Image: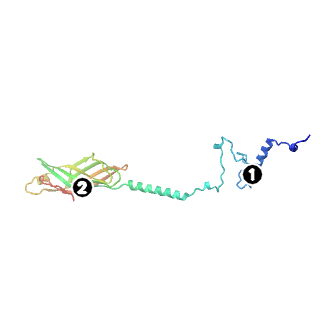
């Protein structure tokens, strides 16, 4: 009886084969915590040196990355920081330029008319003035209140208050017509205005104007004082500019 040529070799157990392959893989894989394989430490407890992690534990494990890894050294960092600083500086400058408070001016322009009414014991006048209000801001300005009082010889003879004026739009000039009543009860001024011996009855009227405005969440008060001449003898005062 003839035996087969390879009958003297025993078939190798599959489990032994798997163990040998695993040991061979462990010899080729670097030790846990080692970069160049020279460290004498234990095998990676997570993947057992196989390079694979158990399924379902991806969100529970941490990766060890060397300090010289290129992923820890982003490119053009200084450029991005400089660009961010430049953009922030530009935005700050724009905000300061457009929202920095600017002046709001009150300018008397001219005397439009003077109406004179003779009473037995007084002379009543209605003086109408044209006033310009200029807004240099980039936001509208709301007029809260406007007051005007007239003085003759340092004596207050009339007063008016307006609170329903429209807002002044940004970077614009708005004209307003303001009328003030001036009853003159002084005996000497009454005699002077009613006298027929004088051809011209000129009075120098002092107007004190105050305007309260609101813009950019704060209030401000503007004052202006002007002198103008009027005729108290009759309705002969013609429109003329205020100097």
Reading the image, the residue beneath label 2 is: 108
> Which of the two residues, 14 or 200, is positioned nearer the viewer here?
14
Dot 1 falls on a residue whose secondary structure is: helix
> Which of the two residues, 19 or 236, is positioned nearer the viewer here?
19
Q: Residue at x 79, y 46 (%)?
A: 20
| Residue 53: percent from left, percent from top | 68, 44
Q: Residue at x 86, y 44 (%)?
A: 6
Check the picture and name the quadrant holding the N terminus: top right
The crowding category of the residue bearing disc 1, from other C-alpha atoms within 10 Å (few below 14, some 14 to 19, many at least 20), is: few
Count of numbered badges drawn on the protein: 2
The crowding category of the residue bearing disc 2, from other C-alpha atoms within 10 Å (few below 14, some 14 to 19, many at least 20), is: many
Q: Does residue 102 appear left or right of residue 121 in this picture? A: right
Numbered tag placed on residue 235 in the rendering: none
In which quarter of the view is residue 16 placed? top right
Dot 2 falls on a residue whose secondary structure is: strand
Mark with earlier residue (2, 1) = 1
> Which of the two residues, 116 or 15, is positioned nearer the viewer here?
15
Numbered tag placed on residue 28 in the rendering: 1
**Relative vertical location of residue 95 with respect to residue 164 in this rendering, above or below:** below
Q: Residue at x 16, y 52 (%)?
A: 114
């Amino acid at each position: 009886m003839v035996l087969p040529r390879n009958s003297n070799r025993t078939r190798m157990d599959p489990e032994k084969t798997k163990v040998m392959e695993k040991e061979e893989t462990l010899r080729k894989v670097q030790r846990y915590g080692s970069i160049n394989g020279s460290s004498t430490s234990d095998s990676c407890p997570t993947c057992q040196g196989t390079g694979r992690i158990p399924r379902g534990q991806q969100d529970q494990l941490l990766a060890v990355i060397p300090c010289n890894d290129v992923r820890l050294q982003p490119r053009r960092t200084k450029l991005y920081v400089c660009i961010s600083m430049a953009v922030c500086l530009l935005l700050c400058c724009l905000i300061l330029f457009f929202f920095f408070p600017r002046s709001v001016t009150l300018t008397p322009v001219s005397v439009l008319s003077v109406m004179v009414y003779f009473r037995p014991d007084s002379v009543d006048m209605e003086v109408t003035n044209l006033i310009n209000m200029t807004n240099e801001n980039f936001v509208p300005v709301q007029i809260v209140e406007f007051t005007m009082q007239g003085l003759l010889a340092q004596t207050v003879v009339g007063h008016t208050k307006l609170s329903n004026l429209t807002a002044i739009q940004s970077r614009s000039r708005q004209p307003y017509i303001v009328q003030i009543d001036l009853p003159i009860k002084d005996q000497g001024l009454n005699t002077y205005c009613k006298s027929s011996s004088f051809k011209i009855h000129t009075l120098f009227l002092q107007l004190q104007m105050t305007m309260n405005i609101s813009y950019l969440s704060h209030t401000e008060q503007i004052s202006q004082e002007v002198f103008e001449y009027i005729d108290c003898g009759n309705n002969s005062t013609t429109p003329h500019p205020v100097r």
